[in-house]
Structure formats: structure tokens, C-alpha cells
Image (tube, rainbow, N blue to C red):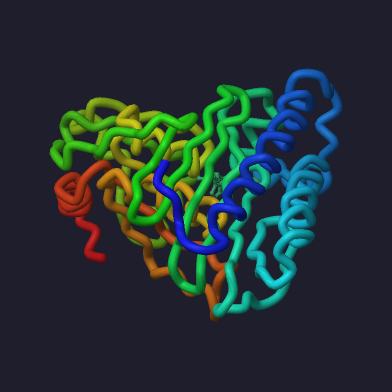
Amino acid sequence: MKSMNNLEPQRLTLVKSLVKSCGEILEKAATEDNTHRLKKNNPSDLVTLYDNKVENILVQGIEREFPKDSFLTEEMDRGPVNINSYIWIIDPIDGTTNFVQRHRDYSISIACYKGDFPVFALVYDVMAQELFEAQKGQGAWLNGERMLPLTGMGYLKNSLVDFSVNGIHTMKKHYNVDLVKLSGSIRGHRALGSASLILCHIARGDTDIYISPKLHIWDYAAGNLILQELGGEVLLYPKDDLLHSPRSSRLLIGTNSSMVLEEFKDYLGLNL
Ligand code: 2AM
Ligand code: CA
């Protein structure tokens, strides 16, 4: 794997080892812990003790080695980030509903930025033991094997599209867009329940389009870099703003090509 500049390889090596240890904790919890140990019990917005535990292990492990780095994490608001430092964007469990319901599709998602720019990213599919990884400008890897670039071709009618019932409702309410009308014009529809994993699946070619109207930066920062490194196209509305509204939600459309993104937006009448 081509090396990066200055202290970035040390950060990457450290975080890979932390992610593997956290993966073991989550895998054990998912298979052996019968109590879901919910902390916040809004039925569709779950937090378990493991979300907090994994976040703390990651943040403390990185902070110990790199005390000047900043953090933007899901479970704790750690105040404004320092835009002149390395910034770690962390979702300790992306897809907590799947984790709690014993579905296998959840991940640990971590992106490392230098200021406004992504430097590297990891998405670890715990149950499949698949580590997706990307370095800005260098490509992406799956368990250390270089991933192939996407073809840049594709059509809506051949696309497998991921969105949720929640997505249907919110797209209608906030954008007056009807996702149900895709029925009959696409190859099929799935709802995996973990944004970062879906973006990695588009990068791998298993899924073609993902639309979700209210994602947070920790849900997509890592997956976006992995997908974009392979030639995928992502639309965010509004654009990221690490300084002023880093904790606000955004509309995301992730696709396997710019052609498919344009066709998808045209079909839905989405003018963004
Ligand atoms: P989805 O609606 O596309 O499934 C974060 O990775 C996961 O939480 C995604 O599956 C995401 O989008 C889902 N999600 C986003 N907003 C949500 C909400 N308001 N309620 C429940 N799930 C949500
Ligand atoms: Ca989460």
C-alpha cells in the first residue's frame, strides 16, 4: 500500500488496531449479550452501552498518542473542532438498530480529516470482518486488497437502490419527492440500515444508489471517501460545514457514477 506523508501512517496504524479490538467487543456483544442494554430508549433512535464504550476506547486511544487532534463523534458533543488540526469523525456503531435486533449489518465508521479535507477513512463491517479503507488520492482497499474502480457507467433501470420507509416519508415532506414512483423503473430496492456500509457496498458494486434525507457526518464521512476514491459520486445537501453546523443532518445521495446521479435526480424532479 502506498504510504502517506508525515504522521498519517502512524495514525492509520493505530486506529486500525483500535478498530479491530472494538470489533471483537461488538461481535462478542452481538452474539453473547442477551440484554440489549439500551441507554436511550426512543424505539427508532437507539443507543446502547456499546456505542459509548466503543466511542470512548477509540477517542481515548487516539488522544493518548495524538493529544492535539480534534473529535467529532456521535455519542458526545465534544465542542467545536480545531480546523487546523487532524479531526476524527467517528460513529462507534453505524446501524445500532441492526446491532440491537441482531441483524449483521452494522459497522464502525471513522474518517480522519486535516482541516476541511479527508485524509483517510475506515469502515469496519464487524460481523463480516471486512475492513474497507481509503486514502485520499490513493484509492481504496478491502481487507488489504485494492478495490477496483467503478466503471463510471450505469443506468437507473439497472440500479439497486437503497432507501428506508423513513426516507420515503421525509423526502415527501421536505422535498416533495416521491420515492415510491421508482417502483418499476429500477432493478430493485433494499434497506440495509447502515449508511456507511451501504456506501461501501456501492463502492464494491453490490448496490448502485443510496438516498437518505437526514444523515449526520459521522454516518457518511468515511463511506463517502471510500466511494469517491473508486469513482462514485455523492451529493450532499447542504454541503458539509465542519465549523458552523457539524452536528446538523443532511440529505445524501450516493451513486456509482455521475451519470446515474443525474438520471436519478432528473427522474425524481429533484433540483439541487
Ligand atoms: P436510512 O433511513 O437510510 O436507513 C445511519 O447509518 C442509519 O440510521 C441509516 O440507516 C439511516 O438512514 C438511519 N436513519 C437516519 N435517520 C433516521 C431516523 N430519523 N430514524 C431512524 N433511522 C434513521
Ligand atoms: Ca451510531
Q: Residue 124: percent from the left, percent from the top?
A: 57, 36
Residue at 81% in and 45% down? 53
User: Along the line of sight, which residue is nearer the eye, 270 or 225?
Assistant: 225
Direction from residue 13 to residue 238 in the image, left or right: left
Direction from residue 191 to residue 7 in the image, left or right: right
| Total labels drawn | 0
Q: Residue 272: percent from the left, percent from the top?
A: 26, 66
Residue at 73% in and 35% down? 21
User: Along the line of sight, which residue is nearer the eye, 137 or 41?
Assistant: 137
Q: Residue 120: percent from the left, percent from the top?
A: 48, 54
Direction from residue 233 to residue 166 in the image, left or right: right
Q: Is residue 210 above or below residue 104?
A: below
Q: Residue 259: percent from the left, percent from the top?
A: 14, 48
The picture quadrant where one finds residue 50 is top right
Q: Which residue lies furthest to the top in this view?
A: 31
Q: Is residue 73 above or below residue 162?
A: below
Q: Quadrant of the N terminus?
A: top left
User: Along the line of sight, which residue is nearer the eye, 173 or 135?
Assistant: 135
User: Along the line of sight, which residue is nearer the eye, 28 or 63?
Assistant: 63
Residue at 37% in and 65% down? 237
Residue at 86% in and 27% down? 35
